[in-house]
Image (cartoon, rainbow, N blue to C red):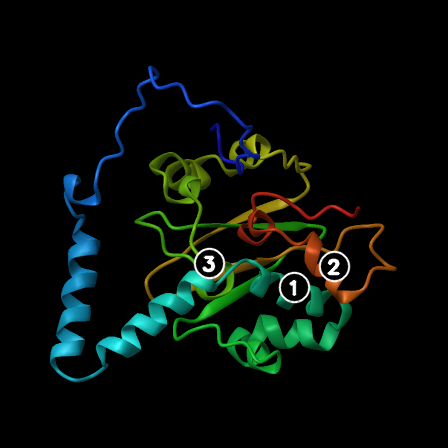
Amino acid sequence: MSDHHEHGEHGMYEHDPLHKHPTQPDLEDTPLTHHQIMQMAVADLLVEKGVIEAEELRKQIEFMDTITPARGAALVARAWIDPDFKDRLVADSKAAGAELDMDIGPIPILVMENTATVHNLIVCTLCSCYPRFLLGFPPDWYKSREYRRRAVSEPRKVLAEFGTELSDSVEVRVHDSTADMRYMVLPMRPDGSEDLSEDALAALVTRDAMVGVTTPKAP
């Protein structure tokens, strides 16, 4: 698998009027998927029936656009410094999130703890179910057919392609997200981070580590 990391900054360039750029297709040029059609139909129906107001729906969409992996990272960092909180997070992520004034959404999110003998990996084999209330929107590679297939059939090879090499003694557990259940990985605290503050620890926790394809590294 290639090209699954964030792109770096673009360099400055002079515009060449003779250089022709490919046109960007409009969204309307691409047929809507089944899930997109269902999503729009359900939203329209909820507004029509008065279950929610259009303004309420708009505000919720705006809120979803603001969510970043920093929310999940805050939970992980607190779990690293507070063993009792970690136990509560694994037992009930919604209640644990509320302790940090964080609403993690209506869909249950199971937090799977990595240990010295178990490494967890998250996938959605059918589409792209993802803990969006904690991590924001899923990356393109997570939604790709290749990842969805190979994460189940050859997870160690997938992990190796992300730079995560595990010994044979470590069990890899793959968790398949669904519309009714999402997962997030609680990675192991890296060696060398003992003196870091909670905020500094949170900065070590990446989106990919909470999906399980990488592990945090101390600075």
Disc 1 residue type (three-letter)? Val
**Contact check, label 3 and label 2, Cβ < 8 Å:** no
Q: Residue at x 21, y 40 (%)?
A: 26
**Residue 106 picture quarter:** bottom left
Residue 209, compared with residue 179, is above or below; it is: above
The residue identified by callout 1 is 76
Q: Residue at x 51, y 38 (%)?
A: 155
**Image location of residue 158, percent across then percent down:** 51, 34
Q: Nearer the viewer, residue 109 or 33?
A: 33
Q: Residues within 10 Å of mark 1 (few under 14, many from 20)?
A: many
Q: Left or right of 69: which side holds 198? A: right
Earlier residue among tags 3 and 2: 3
Q: Residues within 10 Å of mark 3 (few under 14, many from 20)?
A: some
Q: Residue at x 57, y 75 (%)?
A: 91
Disc 3 residue type (three-letter)? Gly
Q: Alpha-carbon distance for marks 1 and 3? A: 16 Å
**Image location of residue 104, percent across then percent down:** 48, 72
Disc 2 residue type (three-letter)? Leu
The residue identified by callout 3 is 136
Q: Alpha-carbon distance for marks 2 and 1? A: 9 Å
Q: Left or right of 95: which side holds 182? A: left
The residue identified by callout 2 is 201
Residue pushed farthest right?
195
Earlier residue among tags 2 and 1: 1
**Contact check, label 2 and label 1, Cβ < 8 Å:** yes
